[in-house]
Image: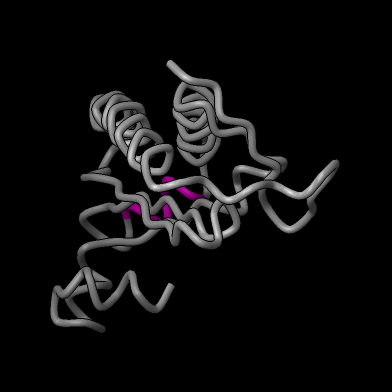
Amino acid sequence: MAQLRYSGGFEQRGPPVKPLNKRDMARLERELVVCLTEACETAKAQIVGFSWLTHRLAPEDFPASLRITWVFEREADKAAAVAGDAKVRMLALTGLALEQAGVQLDHPAWHVRFDSEEACQQSHGGDWTRRLMGR
């Protein structure tokens, strides 16, 4: 697995990060999918109400644009998870997945969002593409 090093978040330390070429970005996307899928499957078995996760990024603004969204069935499940130990577990799983994909961020938690199917249905009619575009 290639080790791609990034300084992400709102602070950048060291020299500016060179944008990735198309091939490196495709490789990174594949690695992220594999590693985040593993995190997702682990979380499904451990976190009540958790359903799935997704990520979005704009290649021209990577890593600042990276967003990982953890999705729950209901708002109540999300609220309970975020208020309890499950949030720490999800952030740890995210950090591990990013590390395994070769992505190094100063503050991975800044790139994580929590959402629910229930909230998407109420505000965007269940259209996740539209919902995630605004986040």
Does 95 lie within the magenta span? no
| Residue at (50, 32) in percent of width and height | 98
Question: Residue 22, position in %: x, y?
Answer: 39, 47
- Residue plotted at (24% across, 27% down): 41
- Outermost residue on the top side: it is 1
Secondary structure mostly seen in the magenta stretch = helix
Instruction: Specify whether 102 is left or right of 114.
Output: right
Picture quarter with the N terminus: top left
Q: Which residues are magenta?
A: 77-82
The percent position of residue 133, horizontal first and vertical second, equals 34, 74
Above or below residue 76? Residue 80 is above
Specify whether 63 is left or right of 113: right
Q: Quadrant of residue 103?
A: top right
Picture coordinates of residue 8, whole percent (x, y): 66, 48
Horizontal arrangement in the rendering, residue 10 relative to residue 55 (left or right) = right
Q: Residue at x 29, y 24 (%)?
A: 38
* Quadrant of the image containing the C terminus: bottom left
Q: Is residue 90 above or below residue 121?
A: above
Q: Where is residue 115? Give x, y as percent.
A: 35, 61
